[in-house]
Amino acid sequence: MIRLSPRPFLAAALAVATLASPAMAADWAVDPAKSTIGFAGSQSETSFNGTFGAWTAEISFDPAKPEAGHAVVTIDVSSAATGDGQKDAALPESDWFDAAKFPKAVFEAKSFRPKGGDEYDAVGTLTIRDTTRDVVLPMKIDINGDTAHATGSLKLVRTDYGVGQGSWANGTFVALDVTVSVDVTATRKN
């Protein structure tokens, strides 16, 4: 049975929180129809992509004080989908996300670090399978009026979060590296 790593999904959630954050001293509402948290990995040297279908984000960001920004992205790990029935059935199982025991992955951006222009780092933590690690999600945030569009990606090692247990832990069949990507559109709240 083929199994995938949940790591990219969580990282994708982190990117979404960061993307929605930049705006005028405001809270932001993500437009789910225009936003995606994705992940990419490889199995037996063949690349695959997936997305998380269910997640929420609470984002607050002031471009004049990005270090005071905050975002929390919560992902339902059982919503991970690659379009491959075998992978999709395996991801929620105990060797991978163990969704029955750890149903949510959470990215919390505790601040945003400006890098110049529309470039930021979302600095925070990512929790998957009850393991929390510090992460930095590089992002590009474009704000036009009351709309923010953010994109970014983050490389993770899935086993740092316990994703891929037993024979899946060594990276022989499923690569250890996973890339989580975020493409988020958000509207400033009143």
Image (spheres, rainbow, N blue to C red):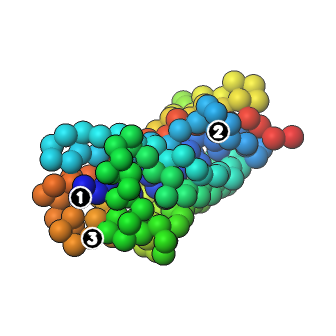
Where does the image place residue 39, in percent across and percent down from the top left?
A: 39, 45
Q: Is residue 47 left or right of residue 156?
A: left
Where does the image place residue 150, in percent across and percent down from the top left?
A: 56, 35
Q: Is residue 153 visible?
A: no
Observer-side mark, 2 or 1, equals 1
Count of residue discs: 3
Residue, x 65% and y 44% (percent of image)?
Answer: 21
Where does the image place residue 173, in percent across and percent down from the top left?
A: 16, 55
Which residue is disc 2 drawn over? 32
Give the distance between the C-alpha atoms of the residues marked 2 and 1, in whole angstroms.
32 Å
Secondary structure of the residue carrying tag 1 is loop
- How packed mark 2 is, by other alpha carbons closer than 10 Å (few <14, some 14-19, many 20 or more), is some
- The image shows residue 94, relative to residue 27, as above or below, that is below
The amino acid marked with disc number 1 is Met
Give the distance between the C-alpha atoms of the residues marked 3 and 1, in whole angstroms.
13 Å
Give the distance between the C-alpha atoms of the residues marked 2 and 3, in whole angstroms.
32 Å
Quarter of the rendering occupied by the N terminus: bottom left
Q: Which mark is residue 165?
A: 3
The amino acid marked with disc number 2 is Pro
